[in-house]
């Protein structure tokens, strides 16, 4: 086993069991569109939440982070893509 194989083996030792109820970031959108996206997701039966985020490029709160439960990522993508 070479050094590269040992490094890949070391990196691959994480748990494969992911918590399906954990909230994960789904999208970062403009602050004006964020609450509307959260409302669309909730109307579709997806448990979604969001909050303002700081954009280091513009140094203002101009973005909105939308999070959904891990199990709802695929459904949320369908709602988002329209």
Image (cartoon, rainbow, N blue to C red):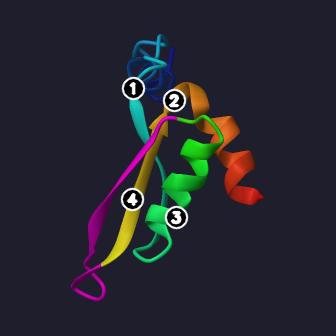
- Residue at image location 66% in from the left, 41% down from the top: 44
Q: Is residue 52 left or right of residue 45?
A: left
Q: Are marks 3 and 2 in contact (CB under 8 Å)?
A: no
The Cα atoms of the two marked residues, 4 and 2, are separated by 15 Å
- Residue at image location 41% in from the left, 12% down from the top: 15
Residue that carries the numbered disc 1 in the rendered image: 22
Toward the viewer: 35 or 72? 35
Task: Identify the secondary structure beneath mark 4.
Answer: strand
Ranked by sequence position, the earlier of labels 3 and 2 is: 3
Q: Label the magenta part by its dominant secondary structure.
A: strand
Residue that carries the numbered disc 4 in the rendered image: 65
- Quarter in which the C terminus is drawn: bottom right
Q: Are marks 4 and 2 in contact (CB under 8 Å)?
A: no
- Residue at image location 52% in from the left, 54% down from the top: 39
Q: Are marks 4 and 1 in contact (CB under 8 Å)?
A: no
Above or below for 55 versus 16: below
The Cα atoms of the two marked residues, 3 and 1, are separated by 22 Å
Q: Are marks 1 and 2 in contact (CB under 8 Å)?
A: yes
Q: In the image, is residue 48 part of the stretch drawn in magenta? A: yes
The Cα atoms of the two marked residues, 3 and 2, are separated by 20 Å
Q: Residues within 10 Å of mark 4 (few under 14, many from 20)?
A: many
The Cα atoms of the two marked residues, 1 and 2, are separated by 6 Å
Q: Is residue 80 left or right of residue 35?
A: right
Residue that carries the numbered disc 3 in the rendered image: 36
Ranked by sequence position, the earlier of labels 1 and 2 is: 1
Residue that carries the numbered disc 2 in the rendered image: 70
Bounds of the magenta segment: 47-61
Ranked by sequence position, the earlier of labels 4 and 1 is: 1
Q: In the image, is residue 76 part of the stretch drawn in magenta? A: no
The Cα atoms of the two marked residues, 4 and 1, are separated by 15 Å
């Amino acid at each position: 086993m070479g050094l590269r194989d040992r490094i890949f083996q070391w990196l691959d030792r994480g748990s494969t069991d992911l918590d399906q109820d954990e909230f994960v970031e789904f999208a970062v959108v403009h602050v004006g569109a964020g609450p509307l996206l959260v409302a669309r997701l909730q109307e579709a039966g997806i448990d979604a939440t969001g909050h303002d985020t700081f954009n280091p490029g513009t140094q203002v709160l101009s973005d909105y982070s939308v999070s959904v439960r891990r199990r709802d990522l695929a459904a949320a993508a369908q709602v988002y893509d329209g």
